[in-house]
Image (spheres, rainbow, N blue to C red):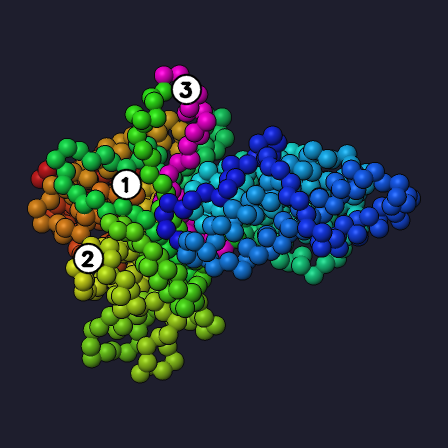
């Protein structure tokens, strides 16, 4: 799949009048559901001949649309998860049928209630399926507006109490549908940072699970309780709370806003590459997750998306420019989210992204995974001699964080070695490795002369911070929310909103200065500048330098393995150890009254 995927035929449908469309004429052969419905009608106290022809046709048309929608929806799971053309037209047909089905049941609700016996939970099921369609279309396109559409349908189900009568029926499978709806709704709300709604949904889901397990004494009680534990841990993953004056928590978004990335100033010479595709891979042992989305994956996902725009409200503002004068807004890069993939799965998605990467575009690979270390010493130092990061297998984990091969004469199979990525360096490649063995990717070789950059996490953290690893990596937190990470390493766990906003403004100044340091450097590798023209990559690079400079100045980060590294290496005196940048970090620490946790002697001569 490539960036710029076309929308389905009717992608903007909402509950209500916006769902429009005419009903297809059903073929004569498809009557099985219709015959069943009419048979039910006759058994409920009436002969088939007593049913008006129009009402009979209404039931027939509804059954056809319902059957067709289920058939198309079930077919979605057979579509390839990668590539572009194979799925777009199918999604379009599915959207179209569900649009017609939703509008049809609205227009003929009374007849369907009387003749078909339509129940509110069945209406909720249709709305839930439409919500799932929008969510999966978001996953396919990375366009956040579809998340808002999914939220609209899921929210309407809750507001209109479509599932309220399910608990009165002695059918556990219907209650499971309701529980799954809650879980899906929670995922969408998490992605939209609607944390207040998430907390309400978790409470409601907890009550529903308790009622479900009490009434039916089912075997899946443990699984549903695990869902609750996972989402509760996910909500609490952020190590710092931002508080209003009334002590309510401020919800902060870490998507790219209009003022997020430092602007390119006149005279800055950078490349024209743009980020088109990203593989976000999570395979860390014991890290908090929810719905196959680890905390690290979630944070990187948001770092590669723009803040959703409300286009309708923008158009209604007085004095808006004409369309010809409006600046064009770039789309989000397309993303694949891979939770604990096997090597085969990872390579398949990687090859698909590589194949369909447009000209002058960049492929980003983000690896958040357990380190795989070589055993023994090798006579050579090739791209398969340093280990790498874990891919999924049934092997046992040894010591929680390291996989050791059984036969020392062979390389570990279930591992992504640096050499495995060499074929893909034929195109511009931007790699981020957050792992206890990230340094395996330090000895990369650029075989084809294309732009190539690797940002590598520390391989170990000071002991005072290690117990936070389950709540997400500190390195990824710096790339996603550098101010929160700075507060965390400074020993702060909460902050007032006013001070938070003041620090954010100062951090934007730091990012602007880092951008100048990079573009004015005379010894920096040109690969960094070739990626610097893209907003997302520019922001990641400036945050990486801020992260590295902060850790080098911090009093408890004293070992080399505590520092991030990169390939190619950055000129330290011009970037991560630049006195001007060090002064900024100390000034930020002074604003927060935590200057005592940083070294002062690094800027004595400034």
Mark 2: few/some/many CA within 10 Å (<14, 14-19, 20+)? some
Residue drawn at point x = 51 percent, y = 58 percent: 79
Q: Nearer the viewer, residue 486 or 174?
A: 174
Q: Which mark is in front, 3 or 1?
A: 3
Nearer mark to the viewer, of 1 and 2? 2
Which of the 4 image quadrants contains residue 574? Answer: top left
Q: Which residues are magenta?
A: 292-319
Q: Which mark is residue 317?
A: 3
| SS under mark 3 | loop
In the rendered structure, the answer to whether residue 309 lies left or right of residue 99 reads left
Task: List the residue tagged with mark 1.
Answer: 535
C-alpha separation, residue under disc 2 versus residue under disc 3: 45 Å
Left or right: 236, with 454 as reference point: right
**Disc 1, SS:** helix
Q: Residue at x 61, y 43 (%)?
A: 98
Residue 450 numbered tag: 2
Q: Sequence order check: which comes first, mark 1 or mark 2?
A: 2
Tell how many labels: 3
- Looking at the image, the residue that sits furthest to the top is 318
Q: Residues within 10 Å of mark 3 (few under 14, many from 20)?
A: few
Check disc 1: other Cα within 10 Å, few if <14, some if 14-19, many if 20+.
many
Along the line of sight, which residue is nearer the eye, 124 or 543?
A: 124
Q: Earlier in the sequence, mark 2 or mark 3?
A: 3
Q: Are marks 2 and 3 in contact (CB under 8 Å)?
A: no
Work out whether residue 289 can be spotted: no
């Amino acid at each position: 799949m490539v960036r710029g995927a076309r929308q389905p035929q009717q992608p903007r449908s909402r509950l209500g009048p916006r769902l429009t469309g005419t009903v297809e004429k059903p073929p004569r052969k498809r009557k099985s559901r219709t015959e069943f419905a009419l048979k039910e009608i006759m058994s409920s106290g009436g002969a088939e001949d007593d049913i008006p022809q129009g009402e009979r046709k209404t039931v027939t048309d509804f059954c056809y649309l319902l059957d067709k929608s289920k058939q198309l929806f079930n077919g979605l799971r057979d579509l390839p998860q990668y590539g572009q053309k194979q799925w777009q037209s199918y999604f379009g047909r599915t959207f179209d049928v569900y649009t017609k089905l939703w509008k049809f049941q609205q227009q003929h609700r009374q007849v369907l209630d009387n003749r078909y016996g339509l129940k509110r939970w069945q209406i909720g099921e249709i709305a839930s399926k439409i919500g799932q369609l929008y969510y999966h279309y978001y996953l396919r396109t990375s366009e956040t507006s579809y998340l808002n559409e999914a939220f609209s349908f899921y929210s309407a189900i809750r507001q209109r109490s479509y599932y309220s009568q399910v608990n009165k029926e002695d059918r556990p499978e219907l209650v499971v549908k309701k529980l799954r709806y809650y879980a899906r709704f929670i995922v969408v709300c998490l992605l939209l940072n609607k944390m207040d709604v998430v907390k309400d949904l978790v409470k409601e889901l907890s009550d529903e699970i308790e009622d479900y397990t009490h009434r039916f004494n089912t075997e899946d009680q443990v699984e549903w309780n695990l869902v609750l534990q996972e989402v509760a841990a996910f909500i609490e993953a952020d190590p710092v709370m931002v508080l209003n004056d009334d002590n309510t928590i401020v919800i902060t978004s870490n998507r790219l806003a209009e003022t997020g990335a430092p602007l390119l100033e006149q005279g800055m010479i950078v490349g024209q590459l743009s980020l088109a595709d990203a593989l976000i891979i999570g395979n860390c042992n014991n890290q908090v997750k929810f719905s196959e989305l680890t905390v690290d994956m979630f944070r990187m996902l948001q770092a590669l998306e723009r803040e959703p725009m409300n286009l309708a409200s923008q158009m209604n503002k007085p004095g808006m420019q004409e369309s010809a004068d409006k600046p064009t807004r770039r789309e989000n890069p397309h993303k694949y989210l891979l939770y604990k993939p096997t090597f085969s799965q990872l390579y398949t998605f990687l090859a698909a992204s590589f194949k369909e990467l447009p000209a002058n575009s960049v492929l980003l690979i983000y690896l958040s995974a357990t380190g795989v270390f070589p055993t023994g010493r090798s006579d050579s130092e090739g791209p398969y001699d340093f280990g790498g990061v874990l891919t999924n297998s049934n092997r046992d984990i040894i010591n929680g964080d390291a996989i050791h091969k059984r036969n020392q004469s062979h390389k570990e199979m279930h591992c992504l070695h640096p050499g495995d990525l060499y074929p893909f360096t034929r195109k511009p490649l931007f790699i981020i490795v957050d792992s206890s063995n990230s340094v395996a990717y330090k000895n990369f070789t650029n075989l084809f002369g294309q732009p190539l950059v690797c940002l590598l996490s520390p391989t170990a953290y000071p002991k005072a911070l290690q117990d936070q690893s389950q709540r997400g990596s500190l390195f990824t937190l710096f790339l996603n929310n550098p101010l929160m990470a700075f507060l965390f390493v400074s020993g702060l766990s909460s902050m007032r909103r006013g001070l938070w906003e003041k620090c954010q403004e100062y951090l934007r100044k730091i990012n602007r200065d880092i951008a100048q340091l990079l573009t004015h450097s005379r010894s920096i590798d040109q690969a960094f500048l070739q990626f610097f023209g893209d907003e997302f990559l520019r922001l990641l690079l400036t945050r990486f330098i801020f992260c590295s400079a902060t850790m080098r100045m911090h009093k408890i980060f004293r070992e080399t393995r505590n520092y991030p590294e990169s390939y190619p290496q950055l000129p330290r005196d011009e970037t991560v150890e630049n006195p001007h940048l060090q002064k900024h970090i100390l000034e930020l620490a002074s604003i927060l009254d935590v200057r005592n946790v940083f070294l002062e002697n690094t800027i004595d001569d400034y």
